[in-house]
């Protein structure tokens, strides 16, 4: 198949950043996606609908018309059940809250130390039908970095699901076979996003031939059997798995540091094309539409987009570097050839 038309896709997990970076991130995201769920880990974080509304006002000038940014608010230990109720009443562009275990990732210092203390908040979210988006990793330094997702699922997430069976939960950017199996077998209120980079790469990309910071992200890339389980899940047509790029730009100098490389892969410049690459390689291009355009909207209870995009199979070269405010950004597949691109409307 050399061409495919899809309902316009949505990205249910993206980092748009702020200030001078918005021009690039928003232009890239709105090139293809109808809706994006923007993550709140700015500094200071996006903790309420007032701040989210101001953030949206900064985003819109850089977007294609008919682009609808939605926001996940940042859960902190100061969030109250009343805040949750207010969010529900105030805004139709905030379908979710994001749970960051403190210390798990970029700007998670405002996050949660004791997840059990958040139970009254989860109760209010369940009652108000707001989705809980979860960065699913424990942060204990005695737990191996490669096992942190599994420990989170077994020790934390399972309990939340048991206590709040009506709470809709998205386990974000899953990286392991354990996560795939867990999501498949647990309550229908639990789903997962899968990034393009976790489908395209395993930990060899990060470690082989010398450390390559381009591929450092969190949760970190795992071994190939896990990559294969993610590919199987994404291409299976199971509506519990849907598109969330976790496109997370960091300027080149923050990635290419001798020590302390920033975690995150930028994929928004070619997001749908990167997914198409994987789906096509595994002879599942016809499964892309459900994953990219239907299942996320259904889970979040938004209508599916009405318009379409068309992808065609033609080689093109990804730019080596992207201007990023006053900095430079190295995108995933920089300087490499991709096989799919968006067909411009005639
Ligand atoms: O790799 C990542 N980058 N993982 C995250 O969870 C956060 C993100 C970021 O904001 O840079
Ligand atoms: Zn993220």
Image (tube, rainbow, N blue to C red):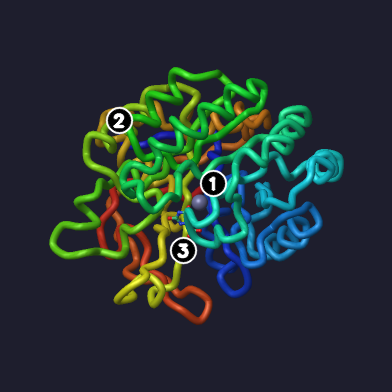
Circle 1 Cα neighbour tier, 10 Å, few/some/many (<14 / 14–19 / ≥20):
many
Residue located 33% across and 58% down the image: 216
What whole-number distance in Å separates the C-alpha atoms at marks 1 and 3? 13 Å
- Pointer 3 and pointer 2: residues touching (CB < 8 Å)? no
What whole-number distance in Å separates the C-alpha atoms at marks 3 and 2? 26 Å
> Where residue 13 is drawn, which disc sits there?
1
Specify the quadrant of the image occupied by residue 64: bottom right
Circle 2 Cα neighbour tier, 10 Å, few/some/many (<14 / 14–19 / ≥20):
some
Query: Looking at the image, which residue sits at the far bottom?
Result: 326
Q: Is mark 1 within 8 Å of ligand 2?
A: yes
Specify the quadrant of the image occupied by residue 226: top left
Residue at disc 2, secondary structure: helix
Residue at disc 1, secondary structure: strand
Circle 3 Cα neighbour tier, 10 Å, few/some/many (<14 / 14–19 / ≥20):
many
Which sits in the foreground, 203 or 319? 203
Mark 2 = which residue?
229
Q: Is mark 2 within 8 Å of ligand 1?
A: no
Query: Looking at the image, which residue sits at the far front?
Result: 142
Query: Which of the two discs, 1 and 2, labels the residue nearer the N terminus?
Result: 1
Residue located 74% across and 56% down the image: 52
């Amino acid at each position: 198949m050399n061409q495919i038309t899809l309902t316009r896709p949505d990205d249910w997990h993206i980092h748009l950043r702020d200030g001078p970076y918005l021009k690039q991130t928003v232009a890239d995201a709105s090139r293809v996606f109808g809706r994006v769920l923007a993550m709140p880990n700015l500094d200071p974080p996006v903790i309420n609908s007032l701040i989210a509304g101001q953030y949206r006002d900064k985003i819109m000038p850089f977007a294609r018309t008919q682009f609808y940014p939605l926001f996940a608010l940042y859960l902190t230990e100061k969030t109250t059940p009343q805040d949750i109720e207010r969010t529900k009443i105030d805004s139709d562009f905030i379908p979710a809250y994001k749970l960051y275990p403190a210390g798990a990732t970029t700007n998670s210092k405002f996050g949660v130390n004791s997840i059990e203390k958040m139970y009254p908040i989860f109760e209010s979210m369940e009652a108000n039908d707001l989705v809980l988006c979860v960065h699913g990793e424990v942060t204990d330094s005695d737990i191996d970095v490669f096992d942190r997702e599994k420990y989170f699922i077994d020790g934390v997430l399972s309990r939340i699901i048991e206590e709040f069976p009506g709470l809709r939960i998205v386990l974000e950017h899953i990286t392991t076979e354990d996560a795939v199996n867990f999501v498949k077998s647990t309550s229908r209120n639990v789903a997962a996003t899968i990034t393009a980079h976790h489908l395209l790469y395993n930990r060899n990309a990060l470690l082989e031939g010398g450390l390559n910071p381009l591929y450092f992200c969190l949760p970190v890339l795992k071994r190939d059997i896990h990559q294969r389980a993610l590919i199987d899940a994404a291409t299976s047509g199971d509506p519990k798995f849907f598109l969330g790029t976790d496109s997370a730009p960091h300027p080149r100098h923050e990635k290419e540091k001798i020590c302390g490389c920033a975690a995150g892969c930028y994929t928004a410049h070619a997001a749908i094309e990167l997914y198409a690459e994987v789906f096509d390689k595994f002879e599942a291009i016809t499964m892309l539409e459900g994953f990219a355009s239907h299942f996320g909207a259904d889970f979040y209870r938004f209508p599916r987009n009405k318009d379409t995009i068309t992808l065609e199979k033609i080689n093109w070269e990804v730019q080596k570097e992207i201007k990023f405010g006053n900095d430079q950004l190295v995108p995933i597949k920089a300087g490499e050839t991709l096989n799919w691109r968006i067909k411009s409307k005639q």
